[in-house]
Amino acid sequence: MAVASLAAHRPDIVRHWKFLGATKLYHLAVIKEGRIKSVLRSQDPDRLMRMSDTAFAALFGQTDRTRREHAHEDGPKVTVARIAALRDRLHLAAARLKSVRDPATRAALCRELRALEVDAARLRHALSATSGAA
């Protein structure tokens, strides 16, 4: 979602720096707007490309990240970014699946999506039962 938002609001950055790859574009997308250009201007593009994803993320420091984490006292941390990434993958898959024409394949995909809906509903119910939210 963050990269899609960056592409919508700053397509010039995505177009110019797409050679960095998805993970580094994600790191660019989650930092504060003003820091993107200042960091990119101060670095050699070849160096940025050769940099590991971890080293690239370290350029911005943890305080500049906008990712929010929610933790339930009884369970592991669940990041909002992971849920947003799942939603993005589902939207991408939906766009790709529109081109499937074979009726048997389409029927099988529908069955899988129904099963996924049931699993998502169970998870939503479990989460709302523990948090009191609907």
Image: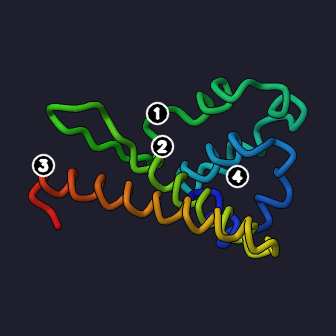
Pick whichever, 96 or 16, lies toward us: 96
Compute the Cα span from label 4 to label 2.
15 Å
Q: Label 4: how many residues lie within 10 Å, few (<14), some (14-19) or many (20+)?
A: few
* Between discs 4 and 2, the one toward the N terminus: 4
Towards the viewer: 99 or 110: 110
Mark 1 crowdedness (10 Å alpha carbons): few <14, some 14-19, many ≥20:
few
Which residue in the structure is indicated by mark 3?
A: 130
Where does label 4 land, which residue? 37
Q: Which mark is residue 62?
A: 1
Residue that appears at 70% across and 48% down: 25
Q: Secondary structure at mark 1?
A: helix
Asked whether disc 1 touches disc 2, contact meaning CB atoms under 8 Å apart, the reply is: yes
Instruction: Name the residue beneath numbered marker 2.
Output: 65
Secondary structure at badge 2 equals: loop
Query: Disc 3 or disc 1, which is closer to the eye?
Result: 3
Tell me where residue 18 appears, x and y as whole percent: 83, 51
The picture places residue 54, in percent across and down from the top left corner, at 63, 25
Mark before the other along the chain sequence, 3 or 1: 1
